[in-house]
Amino acid sequence: AQRVTQPEKLLSVFKGAPVELKCNYSYSGSPELFWYVQYSRQRLQLLLRHISRESIKGFTADLNKGETSFHLKKPFAQEEDSAMYYCALGSNYKLTFGKGTLLTVNP
Amino acid sequence: DAGVIQSPRHEVTEMGQEVTLRCKPISGHNSLFWYRQTMMRGLELLIYFNNNVPIDDSGMPEDRFSAKMPNASFSTLKIQPSEPRDSAVYFCASTPGPTTEAFFGQGTRLTVV
């Protein structure tokens, strides 16, 4: 069975501070990992995926197979980063999400 | 393409009534997902289809829930009878293939009173 765990439901930081949103997964094969973001009352949208190894809006995420983690990081948080962030695992047509972390960036 | 289209955007219904949520995936996408979002449970996968065939419905909470995909351009999620605990935002998403980016609709906010 595949499972995604986001241990923090809420995360609050000040503008300019570093931010890390944690994600751990459980899957026996080679997963595809994603981060999705949902701004207030909007649809979910893809933020980044591990295979592209890109930085979007200053966010990066590295897949650590040894620790089965895919933490999302940004060195300097901005107020517009306030949103709900979901980590997701994809395999065999199935996309499983974690419960999400609500990030609040305070001025 | 207008993206994944869900209707209605909002639905308020009385307990015991039948509710039907609709989804039009992006043309050419092979997989379609139904998710339920609540504060307590986050985003739960209810069911997903591949090439119009239900693959995994283990997330459907109980027999009151049913989903269909009669063709590649339309899917429904039905709740009969509805209960207050079904109140949530229901999202539909589609993908062009396995383990690729999922495109979400704007969701249907269901309130059962």
Image (spheres, rainbow, N blue to C red):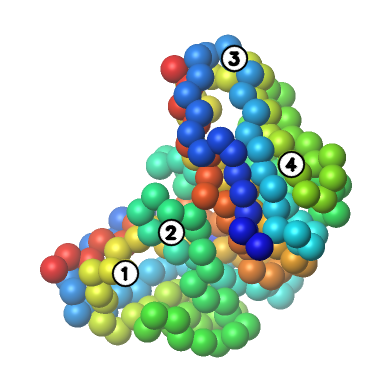
| Residue shown at the point (71%, 44%) measured from the top left | B47
Residue at 30% over, 75% down: A19
The residue singled out by tag 3 in the image is B17
Q: Which mark is residue B75?
A: 4
**Residue B52, numbered circle:** none
Chain for numbered disc 1: A
| Mark 2 secondary-structure assignment | strand
Instruction: Specify few, some or many for label 1: CA neighbours under 10 Å numbering under 14, 14-19, or 20 or more.
Output: some
Please report whichever mark, 3 or 4, sits nearer to the chain's N-terminal start. Answer: 3
> Of the residues tagged 2 and 4, which is closer to the observer?
4
Label 4 residue SS = strand
Q: Which badge, 2 or 1, comes first in the chain's sequence?
A: 2
How far apart, in angstroms, are the residues tagged by discs 3 and 1?
A: 39 Å
Give the labeled residue for mark 1: A81
Query: In the rendered structure, which amino acid carries the disc numbered 4?
Result: Ser
The C terminus of chain A is located in which quarter? bottom left
Q: Amino acid at mark 2?
A: Gln
Above or below, comparing residue B30 to residue B42 in the picture? below
Which chain contains the residue that carries disc 3?
B
Report which quarter residue A77 is drawn in: bottom left
Quick check: can you spot residue B56? no
The label on residue A38 is 2
Q: Position of residue B43 (x, y in %)?
A: 52, 48
| Residue type beneath disc 1 | Asp
